[in-house]
Image (cartoon, rainbow, N blue to C red):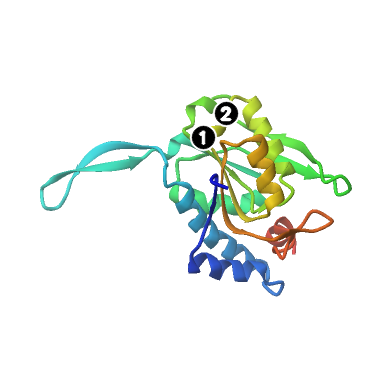
Amino acid sequence: MESVTVLRHPLADEQLQVIRNKESDITAFRAAMTRLGYLLAVEATKDAPVSEASVTTPMEVETPVSVLQDDKILLVPILRAGLGLVESFLTFLPKAKVAHIGMSRDHETLEARLYVNSLPKNLADFEQICILDPMLATGNSCVKSLEVLADAGADPAKIKVICAFAVKEGLGQIAGKFPRVKVITAVVDPVLNNIGYISPGCGDAGDRLYLL
């Protein structure tokens, strides 16, 4: 899919092996997810909004520079697991705003239910909106979040979905319903199992980040 970017880098692979490993404890898992988040943030902000300015170097030469307009970027972590990527992005985007969307999953139907929505009213003021969620599995939570954003006035062409793991089912849902939304993922795994988990994946990212 043209709208999907997959990280292909040994540094990303190194973090993925820690994240996948069931023996990695909460400290190692969190650290690896944060480091992977840095790499995802760099990829996601390749076309971040900038303004032109100039500075004078120690050589007393004035030179043109680009200044990042990170206040024009909105980060939208999907609770809970999406919180695990926020710190990584804020390291590079300290002025970015953060809004939260909370989704719970019905484990029988796998449908997503909205329980938190803290989106600002001025969505049109943002040049880039990044949905953060480590696991793009069925795609139900992500698509529901995209629907919430679209209903609030967000332009799908300005939205990126950032995840650590994805599968074709989730990617297909987004492509079918929101073809202008771009997806950036560290890896695309082969299987979505019968209870809606990515396989081989890393288990429940939210639990491994916050509970175990």
Element type at mark 2: loop
Q: Give the residue at mark 2.
A: 154
Which label was assigned to residue 158?
Answer: 1
Does residue 52 appear to the left or right of 113 in the view shown?
left
The residue at 57%/38% (across/down) is 181
> Which residue is nearer to you in this view: 164 or 189?
189
Identity, as a three-letter code, of the amino acid under mark 1 = Lys
Question: Residue at horizontal 50%, vertical 62%?
Answer: 8
Using the rendered image of the protein, determine whether residue 79 is visible from the camera's viewpoint: no
Whether the residues at callouts 1 and 2 have beta carbons within 8 Å, the answer is yes
Q: How many labels does the image show?
A: 2
Q: Residue at x 25, y 43 (%)?
A: 65
Q: What element carries label 1?
A: helix
What amino acid type should be assigned to the residue bearing mark 2? Ala
Q: Which residue lies furthest to the left in this view?
A: 60
Residue 169 visible to an observer of this rendering: yes
Query: Does 193 appear above or below 118?
Result: below
**Residue 35, image x, y percentages:** 52, 62
- Quick check: 96 above or below 166? above
192 sits left or right of 15 in the view: right
Residue 171 spot, x, y in % from top left: 65, 47
Q: Position of residue 116 (x, y in %)?
A: 72, 36
Indicate whether 51 appears above or below 108: above
Q: Kindly identify the residue that appears in the image at 59 percent across and 61 percent down.
A: 33
